[in-house]
Amino acid sequence: MYMRIGVLGSGIVAQTLAVGFKSKGHDVVVGTSNPTKLADWSREEGIGIRSFAETAEFAALLILAVKGSAAMAVLRAAGPQRMLGKTVIDATNPVADAPPVNGVMPFFTGPNESLLELIQAEFQDVHFVKALNSVGYLHFIDPKFDGGPPTMFIAGNEPKAKVEVRGLLAQIGWETTDMGAAEAARAIEPLCMLWCIPGFSRNEWMHAFKLLKT
Ligand SMILES: NC(=O)c1ccc[n+]([C@@H]2O[C@H](COP(=O)([O-])OP(=O)(O)OC[C@H]3O[C@@H](n4cnc5c(N)ncnc54)[C@H](OP(=O)(O)O)[C@@H]3O)[C@@H](O)[C@H]2O)c1
């Protein structure tokens, strides 16, 4: 499966996913409001840098990889009409601008809502799928763990979009468990908090989640 993938964001998550999906044969472009920031990286990696809107126009599938508090603004800049009917992997987390408390990161969302639902409510004709938010970027591409491939929990309202995302996740070495509609993101987003606790508390970052079944 070859796709034109647009990555919205310029941080380490966006860079890692852009390079990773390019290495799997996809045509990848990165969208940012600050193209000069990535000029050297773009030359080295052979990945084009465009505006958010141009990236949304180019892509058949998008990955949202910006700071959680900027997600809405970035999607507005990308433009709902350019994302119409497209799958958008939402890798963001609603992390608040405050330090962790005993290793636990504060969120700006409450327990009965999620950032995925907030963006899905505003951009109703875009097919958001929560994924890639519950593990550190070092493990995104071809994760290697003693227990075999880890599990990526996903959620979203559009079944066809989740099939696309499952296919892409398999290409980068992940098992996928579909937890259901957008509301399931209320449980998936806090997995990022859980994943980070050993990191902030003990500087341990080399782990991932796996769902065991009988
Ligand atoms: N770090 C990880 O290992 C990890 C793993 C899984 C998920 N995540 C999630 O992935 C997302 C990206 O994380 P990150 O660590 O790569 O970087 P980050 O520092 O959380 O985000 C950087 C990106 O956010 C954008 N941004 C920041 N403030 C903005 C503002 N006020 N207005 C508009 N855009 C703004 C920047 O846009 P410009 O390009 O325009 O500068 C840049 O692309 C976050 O939601 C994070 O929770 C992180």
Image (cartoon, rainbow, N blue to C red):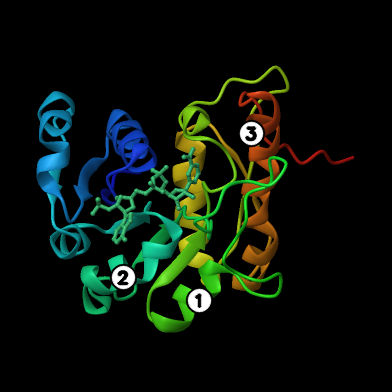
**Rendered position, 147 above or below 27:** above
Q: Of the residues tagged 2 and 3, which is closer to the observer?
A: 3
Ligand 1 has an atom within 8 Å of the beta carbon of the residue at disc 3 = no
**Rendered position, 165 above or below 26:** below
Instruction: Give the percent coordinates (x, y) of residue 160.
Output: 48, 65
Ligand 1 has an atom within 8 Å of the beta carbon of the residue at disc 2 = yes
Precedes in sequence: disc 2 or disc 3: 2
Classify the position of the C terminus by image quarter: top right
Query: In this figure, which residue is indicated by the disc labeled 3?
Result: 200
State the mark number for residue 73.
2
Precedes in sequence: disc 1 or disc 2: 2
Task: Give, as a three-letter code, the residue at label 1.
Answer: Leu
Q: Is residue 187 left or right of residue 122?
A: right
Instruction: Give the percent coordinates (x, y) of residue 38.
Output: 16, 38
Q: Residue furthest right?
A: 214
Task: Give, as a three-letter code, the residue at label 2.
Answer: Ala
Q: Residue at x 27, y 59 (%)?
A: 60
State how far apart marks 2 and 3 are (Cα). Answer: 29 Å
Classify the position of the N terminus by image quarter: top left
Query: In this figure, which residue is indicated by the disc labeled 1?
Result: 118
Q: Residue at x 66, y 66 (%)?
A: 186
Task: Give, as a three-letter code, the residue at label 3.
Answer: Phe
Mark 1 falls on what kind of element? helix
State how far apart marks 1 and 2 are (Cα). Answer: 12 Å
